[in-house]
Structures are given as structure tokens and as C-alpha cells.
Image: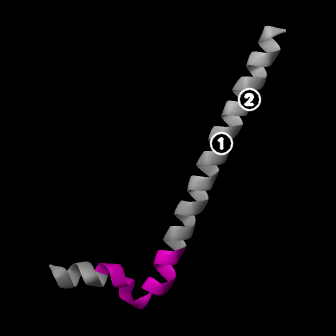
């Protein structure tokens, strides 16, 4: 079992390329999610300002 897990994480010798790519993808997706959340908050705030006037 341990050998299979290690073999999975080694990715057939390509782990040096695969895992950083996964990490970068997660960072980018997290950044996009944060940017979308901030934009939504700003849009709601702007809409509330317009509705008040």
C-alpha cells in the first residue's frame, strides 16, 4: 500500500512538474475566487448607493 501511495505522489517521475502545476492552479483559482468575491461586494455596495438616491 505504501509503495502505491509513494508511486502516486511521484507521478511516474514527473512529480517535479505535476505538483507545482497543481499548486499554481490552486493559487490562481483561489485568487480568482477572492477577486470575484470582492467585485461582488463592491457591486452590491454600489447598487445599495444607487437605490438610496
Q: Secondary structure at mark 2?
A: helix
Write the start and end of the magenta stretch as one range. Answer: 8-20
Q: Nearer the viewer, residue 8 or 52?
A: 52
* Residue found 71% across the figure and 38% down from its top: 39
- Relative side of 22 to 44, left or right: left
Examine the image and state in which quarter residue 24 appears: bottom right
User: Quadrant of the image for the C terminus?
Assistant: top right
> Magenta stretch mostly in which secondary structure?
helix
Q: Which residue is mark 1?
A: 36
User: Quadrant of the image for the N terminus?
Assistant: bottom left
Is residue 50 placed above or below 10 in the rendered structure?
Answer: above
Mark 2 and mark 1 residues within 8 Å of each other at the beta carbon = no
Q: Nearer the viewer, residue 10 or 40?
A: 40
Q: Where's residue 36, x and y in %? A: 65, 42
Q: Where's residue 25, x and y in %? A: 56, 65
Find the distance from the CA under tag 2 to the CA under tag 1.
10 Å
Is residue 15 placed above or below 38 in the rendered structure?
Answer: below
Is residue 5 placed above or below 25 in the rendered structure?
Answer: below
* Residue found 82% across the figure and 15% down from its top: 50
Q: Secondary structure at mark 1?
A: helix
Q: Where's residue 51, x and y in %? A: 78, 11
Examine the image and state in which quarter residue 6 appears: bottom left
* Residue found 34% across the figure and 79% down from its top: 9
Q: Where's residue 48, x and y in %? A: 74, 17
Task: Count neighbours of disc 1 (C-alpha within 10 A) and say few if under 14, some if 14 to 19, many if 20 or more.
Answer: few
Which comes before the other along the chain, label 2 or label 1? 1
In the drawing, what numbered circle is on residue 43?
A: 2
Is residue 18 placed above or below 46 in the rendered structure?
Answer: below
Amino acid at each position: 500500500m505504501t509503495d502505491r501511495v509513494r508511486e502516486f505522489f511521484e507521478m511516474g517521475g514527473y512529480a517535479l512538474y505535476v505538483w507545482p502545476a497543481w499548486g499554481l492552479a490552486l493559487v490562481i483559482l483561489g485568487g480568482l475566487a477572492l477577486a470575484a468575491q470582492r467585485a461582488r461586494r463592491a457591486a452590491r455596495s454600489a447598487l445599495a448607493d444607487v437605490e438610496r438616491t
